[in-house]
Image: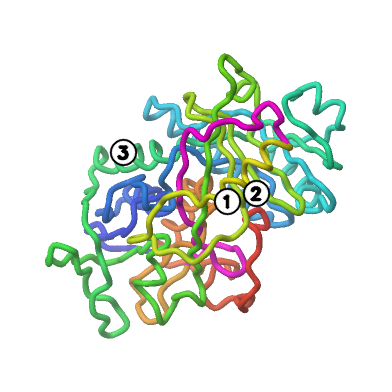
Amino acid sequence: MNTRSSPLRVAVVGAGAFGGWTALHLLRRGARVTLLDAWGPGNSRSSSGGETRIIRGVYGADRVYIEWVARAFALWREAEARWGRRLLQPTGALWMCSGDDRYVRDSIPHLNAAGLAIDEIDRRGAHGLYPQINLEGVETLFIERQAGYLLARRACQAVAEAIAAEGGEVRLAAAGPGPFRGGRMERLELSDGSVLAADLYVFACGPWLGRLFPEVIGERFLRVSRQEVFFFGAPPGDPRFQEGACPVWLNLGEQVFYGIPGNEHRGFKVADDSRGEPFDPTRGDRLPTPALLEKARAFVAHRFPALAGAPLVEARVCQYENSPDGHLLCDRHPHAENVWLLGGGSGHGFKLGPALGEYAAGMILDGGVPLGLFSLDRPGHAPGAMQTQFAH
């Protein structure tokens, strides 16, 4: 427990969902906070960039994440009210399962306990709600009523603006770890040649985390893969693929695809959850791959027949940054007691940002011991153990 008379100085590296929300919670608990990012909150190279992210509660038997989603819903709504900005669009989430549906079924008791409604529906009921979706091959269906999507880039910017407005500092700068002495890190070394000293340091820099700490993290713990997202244009005057008429959806089977209806008329978002090739988030080109585009087109033509042959109106190349077992990282650096490491959340972590930030701020300021599930030395990091994005 901090008993100092003066506020602790905390430097947070990375202004994405994890770093931004952690910085904001630290600030609101009385710390003096500096938030740094090499390209700015919500930038196109970050794992938290882009327009939208799904928020949903299904997490298999992983109760802690479901509880965090419930808490995150409350914090997202609180933020919207406080800032007067829409960040969360409720659409419902349709889970379409071909074959094994245990991932959804194992969630149901925990969802009920957390107050997150989910209903199983039959194909006839689902067709009545969403006739634009071809349910061929789908065996079981579930609807999460409170689910929807978040405005990702705008949310990162809103969090950073709140930090500045509430007395914190937000800086555009790349930061790397300085020297370690006596079990502590002495300072940050910044891209302009200057240094920044603080009492505590938090590194929440997504796909760059392993590069900054190659001996502790590296590719053994966090793997960065290239992921492509496509936006298809609906037929002229057709509202069936906009929010209000279409839910966010998740297709679980031999192919794991997910998507979001066209927010602000940007196009119908479709993404393949399969792990892509290793990717350099700093220097990698972000142009779509023709073969992956054709794979997405084939899926869309089957599951959403009215979009067969639809034009590609936008595409993004982002990255997943995940641990081998799919769980998050929230732990103290093993060789520096004043350094904390947050990461491993690509694909499923954005929605958890407010709750994870609240949790991390408590650990950091109160000197707590993080859950073993999120520790650096947990078991389950054998090569090839990577789970799908929806497994955790």
Q: Is residue 277 above or below residue 93?
A: below
Front of the two marks 3 and 1: 1
State the mark number for residue 115.
none
Mark 1 vs mark 2: in front:
1
Contact between labelled residues 2 and 3, with CB atoms less than 8 Å apart? no
Q: Which residue is denoted by mark 1 in the rendering?
A: 292
Q: Is residue 172 left or right of residue 124?
A: left
Q: Secondary structure at mark 1?
A: helix
Please tell me whether residue 327 belongs to the stretch shown in magenta.
Answer: yes
Front one among 76 and 237: 237
- Above or below residue 293? Residue 340 is below
- Tell me the CA gap for discs 1 and 2: 32 Å
Amino acid identity at mark 2: Ile
Q: Residue 162: which disc?
A: 3
Q: Residue at x 67, y 35 (%)?
A: 93
Q: Is label 3 in a helix, a strand or a loop?
A: helix
Q: Residue at x 45, y 52 (%)?
A: 318
* Image quadrant occupied by the C terminus: bottom right
Q: Earlier in the sequence, mark 1 or mark 2?
A: 2
Residue beneath the point at 57% across and 14% down: 237
Asked if marks 1 and 2 touch (Cβ < 8 Å), the reply is no
Mark 1 belongs to which amino acid? Leu
The residue where tag 2 is placed is: 66
Q: Around disc 2, counting alpha carbons within 10 Å, would you say few (fewer than 14), some (14 to 19), or many (20 or more)?
A: many
Single out the residue that lies furthest toward the top.
237
Range covered by the magenta-colored residues: 303-330
Q: Nearer the viewer, residue 349 or 289?
A: 289
From this view, report whether residue 182 is shown above or below residue 341. Answer: below
Horizontally, is 145 left or right of 124 in the view? left
Look at the image and name its color scheme: rainbow
Which badge, 3 or 2, is on the more N-terminal residue?
A: 2
C-alpha distance separating marks 3 and 1: 38 Å
